Every structure is written in structure tokens, then in C-alpha cells.
Amino acid sequence: MAKQENGKIGSSNHKQLTFNLKAVVQETGLKPDTLRAWERRYGLPQPRRTGGGHRLYTRRDIETLKWLVARQEDGLSISRAVSTWQALTVEGKDPLLEPLDLFAPEPTVVYTPLPTPAEIGSTIHDLRQSWVNACLDFDEQLAESVLNQAFALYQPEIVCLEVLQKGLAHIGEQWYQGAVSVQKEHFASALALRRLDALLAATPSPTRNGRLLVGCAPKEDHTFSALLLTLLLRRQGWEVVYLGANVPIDQLENTINTTKPHLVIFSAQLLHTAATLQQLAYLLQDRGIPLAYGGLVFNSIPKLREYIPGYFLGTQIDQASKVVEHLLTNRPPLPHIKRPTDEYSETLVHFQRRLGLIEASIWDAIAAANVPISNISEANSYLGQNIKAALMLGNVEFLGSDIEWIEGLLVNYKLPVDQLHRYLQIYSEAAKKHLHDVAGAPVLFWLDKVINSIETRFPDKV
């Protein structure tokens, strides 16, 4: 009968001392989830089992785990460390007896010691928070170490959705609220995109019939969602041709003729790129090519979906692949859509022709009144771009007049409430001067509405 003391288990024939899971956790600093994940995914270590199914580790198993942790501290990912172990074993060498300088970094480079997996945490929430914190500190080495830990514990889909996507969403919300700089947001996005690129490069060959074309709408530079969807679809066996950011409508027909996709998928995150996606959708509809689409703007303004001739993929990207499979299998009819009225088309042309005059009058009015309004160029560009997009889409109400839109300008362009109110008054006066009453009516009506909204919401500041 086995005798147990402080996690050590001695067999009756005393041939080899073994250790239970608790003892291994205490000695290596690794969490039980990590030990199980490494055993399941990489086959290291390979503990024996008791009659009751409990793991029994040898001293060599423990030294193997310490060796793997040390390689991580040297800067290797867990998969790379395992590959190194296996390569040495194939060569007939014992990794535990190899000189340490074989794994050491170049002597001219100084590496900051990485935290152990136990310090990072193992729950998906812990990992996401650790990754976000590392990104906000511009700590690339730690951010990569956290991701390595996450991929050792969870399937790639889970890490991409729960750590990368939700982590970026959190950082983006912090930026929108003015709590995080745009540099930090860009740094995190760059790390996330780099990891997605690496995962895409490792996806196997397609196993299902059907080619998909995925990209971002014209003028849309936010690629994370489209790239993540490409990865999810490829890992489910689909052949996906990824076109990247800001796919122009010009030459798209040639691309389609070359690739012959069964379904085209595009994303748009902003109002003005929803408008360019609409124009692209009309082109595909005329050619009889099915389009599926999604993106943040369609989640925040659900009514937009009524104006896009295509299939909405849903609000959750992890469900989009199921929608894609349904579309390819069942070929449902296109939902009924609304088209912009002739009035809106006339207003769009009229506004585009007069926009330069409107902006010139705004500058003159600000100079004459000596009004201290900052970031005028950015505000003019933002407002003009979104008015054109709403008119192109066919409903000026897409601009919104609620407090979220107002607060977006206040935070992103650093405009105090009184300055924003005065700026919109000047914009409205310039628009009334240069837009005809009939053709410009939708724009003039909306400007009056949003000004009234500010006055109602901030009566003591305007």
C-alpha cells in the first residue's frame, strides 16, 4: 500500500518517488489548469494515474515542467519550448542535461524576466485583464506572454473572442471616454492583429465546398473584425480570400470574376463606411452576387440594416459563421430594403456642392466673433462626412440627436459644451445661408433638432 507524506507518495517497492498534483503546483508555480492543458495539448509531461484516476508525477516530470517554464522566461512561447524539447529528444539528447547557454538569449540583449503563469492567472477574465494592462503599459513582452499562457489553456477561438476582441473593446471604450490615449489603442490593436495574422498563417487547407470573399468597406480602416471572422471561418474549413482594409469599389468586379466567390462578406464600423458599403452592395446586387455584412454601426443603429441590400450577420461575431453556413446551404431570399427617396438624392447633391461655401462661412463667422473654438477643421470634417453619409443612406436620423452623439464630439474633439453649442449654431447659420429651403430641408431640420437637444440636456452650460 502506498504511503503519502507532504504530497510525496512512496511505492511499496520504493523504486520511484512520485508526487501528487498539489505538490507539483506548489513546486512549479503552475496552476492545475495549465498542467492539464499542457498534458492534453503537448503531451508534456505524461504522469501516471492511480486506480482512482489521480495524476502521479515523477521527479523528472517536475523537472520537465520547470524546464518549460524556464524556456518561457527565456522568451520562447510554450509551443516553441515544446518543439525544442522534442527536437532534442529526437536527436537522442536529454534536454535536462543540455548546457543552459544553449537556450540563453544573445549576450548583447537584456530581457526583462517574464512573470510566471501563476502570476498572470489562468481564468479567461484574469488573462484578458492582464493583457489589457500590459497593452496600456506598452509592455509588448508581457502582453505576448499573457497570450502564450491563454493559448496554452484555451482553444484559439476562445482566446480571440474573450481576450483579444473583448480586450480591444474595453480599451476602445476607455479611449472614447477620454481615459486612454489613441497611441495605446493603436498599440493594442497592432498586437492583436499581429497575433491573428500568425494564426491565419497556421490554418489548415479548406475542407468544405464554397469560397468566401471577406474585406472591409471602402474607406473602412478597422480590420480586426473582418480578420477575426476570416480566422473563424477558415478554422471551420471554409476557403476564405481576405482582401483587407478599405477595399475600393473600382476593380472589385474583376476580383469577383477571378475568385468566383459563393458569398461576399464586408464589414463597416462607422456611419460613413456604412454608406460606402451600401454603394458596394448595390453593385453586387446588380451582378446577382450575395452579400453578407456586419459591424458596430449596424449594432448601434439597427434601422440601418433596412437600407443595405444584403444579409446581416448578427450582432455577435461568434455566431456569424453559423449565419454564413445557413446562407450557403439554404440561399434565403434577400430581405426587403428601403432605398433613398428622390428628395434625399437631391439634398445630397445640393449639400455636396455647397459644403465648401458652408465651411468658408463658418471660418469667417468664427474669426469675426472671435469665438475660441478648437479643432474646427476636425469638427467640420467629422460633421460634413457624416451628414453626407446619412443623406446617401437615405435617412438623416441616422446622424442621431441623442446624448451619445453629443458626448462623442465633446470627448473626441475636446469641445466644452458651450463651444459645441456655439459651433453648431454657427454651422446652422452657414447652412441656412447656402442651402435652399426645399433641397436643404432635411439637413436644416436636423441641425435645429440637435441644437435643441443640447439646450435641453445642458441648460446651465449654454
Image: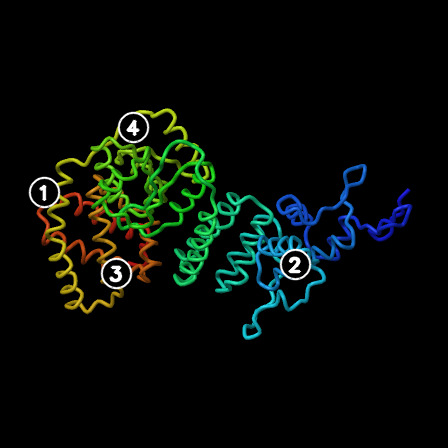
Report helix, strand or loop for mark 1. loop
The N terminus: image quadrant: top right
Disc 2 versus disc 3: nearer the observer = 2
What residue lies at 39% left-to-right and 26% top-to-bottom? 329
Of callouts 2 and 3, which one flags the residue occurring earlier in the amino acid sequence? 2
Q: Position of residue 345 (x, y in %)?
A: 14, 40
* Quarter of the rendering containing residue 391: top left
Q: Is residue 277 left or right of residue 212?
A: left
Q: What amino acid does circle 2 point to?
A: Val
Mark 2 in CB contact with mark 3 (< 8 angstroms): no
Q: In the rendered structure, which disc, 1 or 2, sits on the residue that comes first in sequence?
A: 2
CA separation, marks 1 and 3? 28 Å
Q: Tell me residue 194's x, y (percent).
A: 44, 55
For label 4, the residue is 335
First of labels 2, 4 by sequence position: 2
Spatial CA distance of label 4 from label 3 is: 37 Å
367 or 237, nearer to the observer? 237
Q: Label for residue 378?
A: 3
Q: Which residue is mark 1?
A: 438
For disc 2, the neighbor class at 10 Å (few under 14, some 14 to 19, many from 20) is many
> CA–CA distance between discs 4 and 1?
32 Å
